[in-house]
Image (cartoon, rainbow, N blue to C red):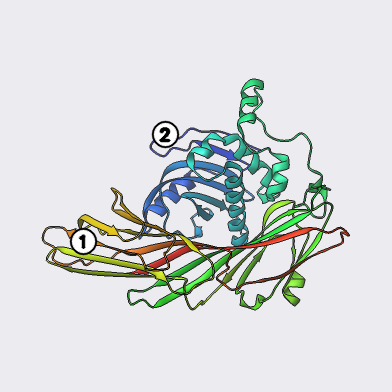
Amino acid sequence: MLQCIFLLSDSGEVILEKQLTGHRVDRSICNWFWDHTNSQPNSYKVVIIIIIITFSLSSIIIFDFSVLCLQQQPVIASPTHYLFQVCREGITFLACTQVEMPPLMAIEFLCRVADVINGYLGGLNEDSIKDNFVIVYELLDEMIDNGFPLTTEPNILQEMIAPPNIVSKVLSVVTGNSSNVSDTLPGSTASCVPWRTADPKYANNEVYVDLVEQMDATINRDGVLVKCEINGEVQVNSHITGLPDLTLSFANPSILDDVRFHPCVRFRPWESNQILSFVPPDGQFKLMNYRVRKLKSTPIYVKPQLTSDGGICRLNVMVGMRNDPGKTVDSVNVQFQLPPCILSADLTSTHGTVNILSNKTCTWSIGRIPKDKAPSMSGTLVLETGLERLHVFPTFQVDFRIMGVALSGLQIDKLDLKTVPYRFYKGFRALTRAGEFEVRS
């Protein structure tokens, strides 16, 4: 297995490269990818890190330069390689191979890599990855072997590789040993349930299930709901002694359009009876992803009005409750980008605060919507000299949070524990927040 390290110059030279098999992938593929992404329309440039991982002919190459990151194709065919890419928090994970392979496997593996690195480093950004190169290398060594995914379960990886902390960094400086890899192999790696820690023991046995949903909605300039759907996750935090066997059922599973499961879920019980039967990993994990489409309404409304004449544009935005979800709607924010032709803006609100940044991004922080009166924001926008009317209208991005409610309507029916005779405590929660919630004007 070849390993090598390079430095990156300001001109876009490769700063780091790691080969995982004997066949070396030439770095010219990176130049081709750079040229291809720059040739794509409707994109913008951001500074990102690219991690290239080749399956079967595996290599890892990390860059640091401006790359187009909007509307990218997940699968790209170059003259010599097939490329797969996943963007997370401004960081692009790019996989390449010279052999035929299922593209979803490559994309899913890149998503796993992004999730694991995000969990280890507490966020995905250029500085944290550069400060923890050793951790990233060690994780990739365990997650992929000779080009094929191997260990991708975060709980098992944390037993094998200690997450970075202040104590480990001090010890590495004092002892000169920068490795975080454990000397012993976790017992669960040889188990039939490799995602679970071997024989954990707890004084209190408990399982917590969270429904975490994001609402994506698009409302046109006439106030008509064009699209409204929910993307949700079933997150579980399990601390149970031994080897438990759990079953989780929903009161209304028929509303789920698309589902994706953790490897611990047995597919046949779900296919026949829509019941989740699984042996849970130890600790926190994502049990299931789902989507609910074609929702009919949103919890709040945003009504923008823009009128312009004589070089002045008058703006009025009103926000209020459309359907009461039964719980408090808080953390409400409305953000929009002022058009380039706007010279200055004077905006005030009846509730909350309005901030206009130097890049012409306007943020209206409302917080909790009052019950007695709908908050509004109004003011004037001064157009460029020579322009009488506004021809480019902003799109309003809306953010909110509702604790204790799953707006999809999904309800948990029951959670049962089999194979273990003792009792356990179980708890259920729900959270809905805005995802890509857009109101056009």
Q: Quadrant of the C terminus?
A: bottom left
User: Where, by quadrant of the figure, is residue 222 drawn?
Assistant: bottom left
> Foreground residue, 51 or 305?
305
**Whether residue 196 is situated above or below residue 304 in the rendered picture:** above
Q: Residue at x 78, y 59 (%)?
A: 279
Tell whether 127 sits left or right of 145.
Answer: left
> Foreground residue, 275 or 377?
377
Q: Secondary structure at mark 1?
A: strand
> Foreground residue, 347 or 145?
347
Query: Can the viewer see residue 3 in this picture?
Result: no
Q: Kindly give the residue lying farthest to the front in the view shown.
A: 372
Query: Can the viewer see residue 356 in this picture?
Result: yes
Which residue carries the number 1 mark? 380
**Label 1 crowd bin: few (<14), some (14–19), many (20+), radius 10 Å:** some
Q: In the image, which is nearer the foreground, mark 1 or mark 2?
A: 1
Amino acid type assigned to the residue bearing label 2 in the image: Ser
Q: Kindly give the residue lying farthest to the top in the view shown.
A: 174
- Residue 121: percent from left, percent from top: 58, 41
Q: Quadrant of the N terminus?
A: top right
Which residue carries the number 2 mark? 9
Q: How many numbered marks, from 0 up?
A: 2
- Residue 163: percent from left, percent from top: 64, 39
**Whether residue 175 is situated above or below residue 426 in the rendered picture:** above
- Residue 199: percent from left, percent from top: 84, 48
Q: Residue at x 39, y 73 (%)?
A: 219
**Whether residue 427 is situated above or below residue 123 in the rendered picture:** below
Amino acid type assigned to the residue bearing label 1 in the image: Thr
- Residue 123: percent from left, percent from top: 54, 45
User: Where, by quadrant of the figure, is residue 396 drawn?
Assistant: bottom left
> Foreground residue, 171 or 87?
171
